[in-house]
Amino acid sequence: MFNIIQRRYLYFALSAAIIVPGVIAMLVSIARFGAPLRLSIDFTGGSMMELRFENPVVPGAVREVFVDNGLGDTVVTTAGDDRTAVIRCKVLEEEQKVKLQEELRQRVGQFEELRYEMVGPTVGEEVTRAATVAVIAASAVIVFFIWWAFRKVPNSFRYGICAISAMAHDVLVATGLFSLAGLFFGWEVDALFLTALLTVIGFSVQDTIVVYDRIRENVPKRRGEDYETIVNRSLLETLHRSLATQLNAIFVLIAILLFGGATIKQFIVVLLVGMISGTYSSIFNAVPLLVVWNNGEIGAFLRRVFGGASRATT
């Protein structure tokens, strides 16, 4: 029988190698923008215009118009092609908006307004608060549900904690990627990002529970086997089901990413990365963590690290 669990520390190291660059990007983003991710007007409040020019446009030329009118924190990016500019700035009065658009036509060129949105600071604060509460509430409910569903299995609380750990892995991977994209491509977090993140959380936990349920079935049936063997057997028995389910969703997302519109591109990217990360974490993180915890390897590892450090100092 192929032993997947045996290489658990290799999987943990790979996860760390993926997460660490994203965490570094979030720290850089905090230093530059005051937040781990570049926030859109859904969170900060402000105005957003999407303009399609008749000729290719340079974002710097568009931003210069706003800077000359006292809006130095304006962010201008392109969307889909070099003729469409997305402009985010402070809340604009109607007269100020008309003046800016008139100056844009004179200095940059003729354009068509595709979209204009305005969100006040109060709305942005409410969205931020609601998003935080949603993630915390979802995590608490997941832990309670898994604890209750696996209450007849020894140490059922561990299953919930390990599932949340895998979920946190997926959240860090998705947010880390988005933070990197924010630094290099100007991507900003909006309400769709939160929708994608909560969807990723759901898929990740669902896939993890499938494996956990097989472990629950096999523990009483295979009392002569050690826990690591039972977990590995359960993982192999559900592996084809997990991969088949997730790969179907991943292929659909890839198709939408390639042929869908530019306005949902960031949303699909977060979903796609989250799905791939969720498939990985449910197999190679959530389940091996159970074995590590059951074997007491966390305590042994910490004793080796801090014991070695104390001997070195003496």
Image (cartoon, rainbow, N blue to C red):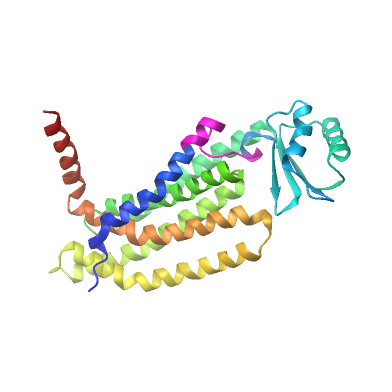
- Quick one: quadrant of the C terminus? top left
Residue 151 appears in the figure: no
Residue nearer the viewer, 62 or 39: 62
Q: Which residue is drawn at the image coordinates 20% and 41% (left, top)?
A: 302
Horizontal and vertical percent position of residue 3: 24, 68
Horizontal and vertical percent position of residue 262: 68, 56
Q: Which residue is drawn at the image coordinates 78% and 27% (left, top)?
A: 68
Q: Does 40 lie within the magenta span?
A: yes
Q: Does 121 lie within the magenta span?
A: no
Q: Tell me where the magenta segment starts and ends, as one range.
A: 27-42
Residue nearer the viewer, 26 or 159: 26
Horizontal and vertical percent position of residue 19: 41, 47
Number of marks present in the image shown: 0
Q: Which residue is drawn at the image coordinates 74% and 29% (left, top)?
A: 67
The reply, left or right, for residue 264 in relation to residue 231 is: right
The reply, left or right, for residue 254 in relation to residue 206 is: right
Residue nearer the viewer, 9 or 128: 9
Q: Which residue is drawn at the image coordinates 43% and 41% (left, top)?
A: 23
Among the 4 quarters of the image, the one containing residue 22:
top left
Residue 294 appears in the figure: yes
- Quick one: quadrant of the N terminus? bottom left
**Can you say whether 114 is above or below 249 in the image?**
above
Residue nearer the viewer, 9 or 135: 9
